[in-house]
């Protein structure tokens, strides 16, 4: 993960850090292969395999992943399949092209709605409509990189990417403990005006009712050349990166509603495209939002190396334009010209990082950078004739500070510590159902520790017992100012939400702790660890409500601790057997109150093998 000022060359979301996903490299020597097979409780299975071949001229690699399981809640079966083909062609010592195509598919039964207080305490894992609720997705990805080694000091890397992602979710319940709203009144579910009623949420009723499909289509592509080179400037050895990116997005957001049971099938729901709600049919096209995005990015970063010091300034320019057009809202096509709105932002994002090598075992570091996160669209628009400019949110911005050290000075010990502070502006909050607004500023500050003690180094044993831990204390996470936001009627949305200065941010626990004790045998043939993950109490709304509501959407999330175990046995150089146990004490705990109460994972035990050919 890239954090701090180093993420200045990534974006556009540069507030909380960047995760760097690295795929398996193409083999360039021989024909290696690997397989991983895993089985576990709750119907879990995981199969992964890859095979490749290559030589000095390039190679090919094919991989396949297949996952299935019963999920956390009842009737929440999930299925995931992904396959990928990756190739590399080396033209000569200076030019090479790497290309990858991947297709990801998911077909899972997931209830988006949580549980009320009564439902949760009756059975925290129930989901009466789970067999009917669905989440389906297909994502096709193409990624190509051309590397040109200009000379020993400079490399030009140019990439092209294209993603076509289609996903849709179906739900039958709007909120916790509510009835299924879209059910027929006559046998056969004819397409007749007024043939609609609500029924209690049971597995039997779920079979005969309709619901809401929310298909989304995301198509985006981009190109990004990046030049990296070493040079001498101001008498220092420097490493520079200069790059630019052009990015285009086309987003289509739909919603279909219907009380005919055939609406459980997405293709049937799509046949109601452009059908108005007032036509009195069994279904209608509730929502259609079109979003077009164009982003241009330019960045430069230079690391000045001078003895024990490395100073790295950087600058990033984000130039983003996006247009939002509300083609359908509340089941009809609005006619007002304000339904379409175009926003444009140009933002300079500077950053400065520094490291100091105190000695061979200790490094001090610090940095400051400006973060940026583009705005997100609203959903469930209630206005029959929406004003797109009023509904638009502005990008979130932040100034991020950090200072810390990495050290192995103490015997047999590795220790990292970081202090961080973030001043956050234009924070987006969830004010009403489906409605997001910029509501002011917030401040977050805390300290992170991570470390490991290896007792084999202390006592000179052939085996190793170690203690490993990570701890984060976010002692400050509060709203620091309030911006009044009014709706069309003149009512203050922020005040209505009881949003006050000094309130703690939702879903921001003060303490997060992970501690584990591990064992590694001589020659590392066997290793195992047992650990505890702890998260302290959290608020779930800006009002910091403590008293739980009947719906389960308000209240706190209590602290929880989960016990996990991992074992590995390397039977041969090629074969490794392993065992994983998560929440082995089988503790019931709460993870979310968004749309109702949602329980965490029950005890999950699995065993598997890795074999490298």
Image: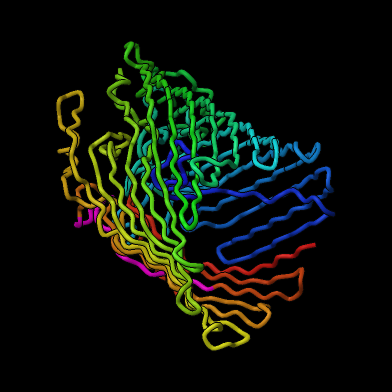
Give the answer, above or below, for where 124 lies relative to 565: above
Q: Judge whether residue 95 is colored magenta.
A: no
Range covered by the magenta-colored residues: 546-565
- Say whether residue 588 is visible: no
Quadrant of the rendering where the C terminus is positioned: bottom right
> What residue do we see at 38% from left, 60% from top?
404
Between 452 and 210, the residue placed more toward the observer is 452
* Left or right of 590, for residue 150: right
x%, y% of residue 493? 19, 34
x%, y% of residue 546? 20, 57
Between 371 and 561, the residue placed more toward the observer is 371
**What secondary structure do most residues of the magenta stretch adopt?**
loop
x%, y% of residue 258? 44, 30
* Left or right of 409, for residue 403: left
> What residue do we see at 39% from left, 20% from top?
326
> What residue do we see at 51% from left, 26% from top?
249
* Left or right of 213, for residue 45: right
> What residue do we see at 66% from left, 67% from top?
608
């Amino acid at each position: 993960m890239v954090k701090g000022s180093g993420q200045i060359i990534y974006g556009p979301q540069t507030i909380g850090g960047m995760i760097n996903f690295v795929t398996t490299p193409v083999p360039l020597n021989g024909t290696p292969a690997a397989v991983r097979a895993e089985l576990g409780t709750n119907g879990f299975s995981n199969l992964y395999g890859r095979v490749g071949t290559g030589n000095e001229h390039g190679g090919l690699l094919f991989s396949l992943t297949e996952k299935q399981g019963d999920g956390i809640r009842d009737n929440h079966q999930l299925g995931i399949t992904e396959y990928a083909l990756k190739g590399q062609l080396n033209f000569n010592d200076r030019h090479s092209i790497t290309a990858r195509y991947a297709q990801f598919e998911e077909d899972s039964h997931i209830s988006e709605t949580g549980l009320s207080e009564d439902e949760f305490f009756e059975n925290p894992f129930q989901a009466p409509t789970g067999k009917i609720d669905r989440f389906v997705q297909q994502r096709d990805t193409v990624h190509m990189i051309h590397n040109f080694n200009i000379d020993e000091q400079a490399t030009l890397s140019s990439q092209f990417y294209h993603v076509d992602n289609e996903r849709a979710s179906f739900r039958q319940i709007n909120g916790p403990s509510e009835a299924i709203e879209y059910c027929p009144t006559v046998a056969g579910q004819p397409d007749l005006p007024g043939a609609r009623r609500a029924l209690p949420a049971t597995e039997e009723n779920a079979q005969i009712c309709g619901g809401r499909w929310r298909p989304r289509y995301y198509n985006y592509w981009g190109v990004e050349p990046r030049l990296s080179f070493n040079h001498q400037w101001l008498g220092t050895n420097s490493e520079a990166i200069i790059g630019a990116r052009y990015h285009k997005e086309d987003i289509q957001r739909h919603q279909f509603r219907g009380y005919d049971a055939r609406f459980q099938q997405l293709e049937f729901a799509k046949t109601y495209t452009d059908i108005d709600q007032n036509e009195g049919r069994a279904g209608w096209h509730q929502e259609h939002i079109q979003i077009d995005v164009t982003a241009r990015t330019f960045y430069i970063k230079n690391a000045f190396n001078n003895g024990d010091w490395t100073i790295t300034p950087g600058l990033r320019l984000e130039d983003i334009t996006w247009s939002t057009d509300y083609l359908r809202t509340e089941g009809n096509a609005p006619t007002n010209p304000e339904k379409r709105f175009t926003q444009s932002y140009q933002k300079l994002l500077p950053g400065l990082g520094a490291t100091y090598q105190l000695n061979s075992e200790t490094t001090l570091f610090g940095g400051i950078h400006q973060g940026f996160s583009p705005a997100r669209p609203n959903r469930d628009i209630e206005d029959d004739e929406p004003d797109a400019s009023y509904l638009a949110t502005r990008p979130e911005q932040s100034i991020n500070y950090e200072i810390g050290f990495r050290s192995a000075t103490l015997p047999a010990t590795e220790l990292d510590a970081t202090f961080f502070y973030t001043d956050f502006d234009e924070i987006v909050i969830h004010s009403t159902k489906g409605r997001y607004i910029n509501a002011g500023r917030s401040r977050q500050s805390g300290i992170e520790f991570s470390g490991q003690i290896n007792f084999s180094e202390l006592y000179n044993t052939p085996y190793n017992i170690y203690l490993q831990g990570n701890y984060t204390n976010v002692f400050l996470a509060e709203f620091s100012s309030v911006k009044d936001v009014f709706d069309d009627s003149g009512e203050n949305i922020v005040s209505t939400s009881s949003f006050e200065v000094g309130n703690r941010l939702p879903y921001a626990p003060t303490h997060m702790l992970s501690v584990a004790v591990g064992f590694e045998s001589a020659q590392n043939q066997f290793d195992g660890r047992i650990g505890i993950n702890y998260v302290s109490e959290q608020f779930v709304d800006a009002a910091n409500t403590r008293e739980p509501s009947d719906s389960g959407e308000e209240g706190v999330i209590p602290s929880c601790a989960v016990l996990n175990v991992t074992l590995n046995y390397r039977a041969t150089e090629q074969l490794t057997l392993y065992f994983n146990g998560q929440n082995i004490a089988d503790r019931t705990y709460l993870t979310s109150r968004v749309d109702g109460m949602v329980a965490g994972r029950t005890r999950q035990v699995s065993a598997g093998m890795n074999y490298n050919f």
